[in-house]
Image (cartoon, rainbow, N blue to C red):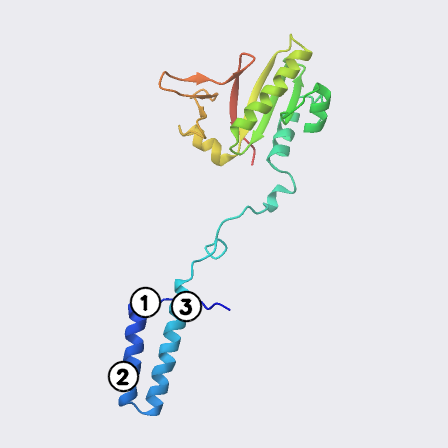
Amino acid sequence: MSMQYRSLSPHSITFIIIALLALSFASRDALTQALRGASTYLTSESRVSVPRSHSDAGGQTASPNPSDRGFDQEEKVRRLLAEHYEQRFGKSDEAIREALGIRGKVADFVGYNARAAQWLIAESKASDIDSAFEQLRNTTQALVKMNSQARFEIRLFLDARNFEILNNGGDIFGWRMNTAGYLGWQPESGWVDATIQGVKILVQCAPK
């Protein structure tokens, strides 16, 4: 069986030497007190020197928000858009995928506004804009394939934190938002709009 030894700090060594020197002139009671003090000191030092785990350090984890009442961001966006758009292809990712014959990722929402004679394709995300773009592109291409004359708009909903990053001129893995609210990126040559089938993607803040 192997034994592990912990190295002592200079302070610890000094304290032990002082305690040992006390042996030559201290009374039994004083010696007992000194040794107890040394033991307490070393114990406390050992606790301080142990690295803290993530749980000890108070790492933050996601926790349910009681005010959500079971509705996550995706469902809140669907409810908001459903007030103005008819969900002709269904109210879930699976229903939309089946109705449009999509193989792969699909957008959260596809709706039709009869008054405006216009479709809306929308996706809700926290910060994974790459995936959102793929979902919006797959869904838009499937809709256009089914109806080449379809008029449509595209929207991306981000949570409040990430929307503010873009709104304040920041970027999320290279993605940015211009002053008009549209998604794109900005190389040295200048601003480039992110478009799907020639249509820009409007970025909005998801409802709380």
In this rendering, which labeled residue sits more in front, label 1 or label 3?
Answer: 3
**Which quadrant of the view contains residue 74?**
top right
Element on which disc 1 rests: loop
Residue 93, horizontal then vertical, whole percent: 68, 28
| C-alpha span from label 3 to label 2 | 24 Å
Residue 151's label in the rendered image is none
Q: Which sits earlier in the primary sequence, circle 2 or circle 1?
A: 1
Element on which disc 2 rests: helix
| C-alpha span from label 1 to label 3 | 13 Å
Vertical order, 61 against 109 (above or below): below
- Cβ–Cβ below 8 Å for labels 2 and 1? no
Reading the image, the residue beneath label 2 is 21
Disc 1 marks which amino acid? Answer: Ser
Q: Residue at x 39, y 63 (%)?
A: 49
- Cβ–Cβ below 8 Å for labels 3 and 2? no
Q: Residue at x 33, y 88 (%)?
A: 30
Disc 3 marks which amino acid? Answer: Tyr
Q: Can residue 92 be spotted in the picture?
A: no
Q: Nearer the viewer, residue 99 or 11?
A: 11
Residue 5's label in the rendered image is 3
Residue 202, horizontal then vertical, whole percent: 52, 21
